[in-house]
Amino acid sequence: MNTGSAKIMGIHHVTAIAGDPQRNVDFYAGTLGLRMVKKTVNFDDPETYHLYYGDGAGTPGTIMTFFPWGDARKGRIGAGQLVTTSFSIPADSLGYWTERLVEAGVRFEKPRDRFGETVLTFSDPDGLRVELVAAQDGREGTADGTMPAGDSVRGFHHVTLAVEDADRTAGLMTETLGFRQTEEAEGRTRFAAGDGGPGDLVDISGAAGFPRGTMGVGAVHHVAFRVPDDEAQLAMREEVAALGYDVTPVLDRNYFRSIYFREPGGVLFEIATDPPGFAVDEPQDELGTHLKLPPWLETRRERLEEVLPPLHLPTATAETTGGNE
Ligand code: ZN
């Protein structure tokens, strides 16, 4: 039982390490048809990008973000990590996606059933494990021009954590973060927050004896969970700190406010507020089209625009008949 007052509403975003930024754009905005909702820099390392993809509005629960670190060391997927990021597609769009992935040259595993839904598993160009889950999902599609909105990714479906001691991670999630266990099969236990729909789900997979993952290109850096406001975030911070976790102070991420701590299995958890959202510094219909910097980095804009490689969104690339390379 959740003894505290604050509860997680679902997944807010997932952040991973990528290699080449343009290749990352081509895959997530191109092949997967997500919208780039923010092009900014890594606030802790401003000479590198922080790219955000999501639905048309940048709704929490749809946000996949990357730190593209060029030729940084490759990570290894393993225990103590978020090992698979699963997106939700409409149940009747499975045929469309199978064809789209084949055309894009993405090799996927034989479709499998998981808790009554069909799952396509593949890797992104950096080796990150990604899935599409054909699901009943009431969320709107992404009308970004590279694919029919009706078939588009709706946002996250679930994420899978691989941890050595599944019970300890599960304990934190159910006793403190407000998740409840909903399903269990084949070494996988599903937990739901909020309404329990796609985007609110976390699977824990027991990984006792498996090699630990290492951070690097192609690995997930952290998962962020949603709280409605600052008050809920502070309440949860207090509860997590009272349990002895080393939790950061509230950090201003410009589009949300964040706290971070490592759960017992080693996965970095973030708790992020829904507000203010991605339209705080550019109009919704222009999301992702400008390099946006937080106020404290604006003085460095000229230098940053010089060192950051130019990025082409897939629609723009398609219109450029001569190509960019
Ligand atoms: Zn984050």
Image: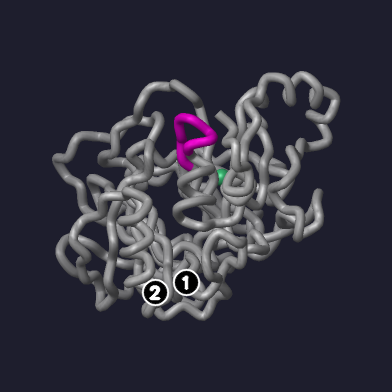
- Say what secondary structure mark 2 lies in: helix
The residue closer to the viewer here, 45 or 31, is 31
Indicate whether residue 20 is drawn in magenta.
Answer: yes
**Bounds of the magenta segment:** 16-23
Q: Is residue 52 left or right of residue 206?
A: right
The answer as to whether callout 2 falls within 8 Å of ligand 1 is no
Q: Is residue 133 left or right of residue 211?
A: right
Q: Is residue 1 visible?
A: no
Q: Quadrant of residue 216?
A: top left
Q: Is residue 13 left or right of residue 233?
A: left
On residue 93, which mark appears?
Answer: 2
Label 1 crowd bin: few (<14), some (14–19), many (20+), radius 10 Å: many
Magenta span includes 312: no
For the point 61% across and 27% down, the residue is: 48
Earlier in the chain: of badge 1 and badge 2, it is 2
Q: Which residue is mark 1?
A: 151
Q: Give how far apart the Cα atoms at labels 1 and 2 are.
A: 5 Å
The disc at residue 246 is none
Q: Residue at x 74, y 25 (%)?
A: 305
- x and y percentages locating residue 10 in the rendered image: 51, 65
Three-letter residue code for mark 1: Asp
**Foreground residue among 8 and 159:** 159
Please say if 229 is above or below 287: below
Tell me the quadrant of the picture where the C terminus can be found.
Answer: top right
Q: Are the residues flagged by discs 1 and 2 in contact, CB closer than 8 Å?
A: yes
Residue at disc 1, CB closer than 8 Å to ligand 1: no
Quadrant of the picture in which ligand 1 is shown: top right
| SS assignment at label 1 | helix
Query: In this rendering, does residue 109 appear at all?
Result: yes
Q: Nearer the viewer, residue 150 or 11?
A: 150
Look at label 2 and name its amino acid: Ser
> Which quadrant is home to the N terminus?
bottom left
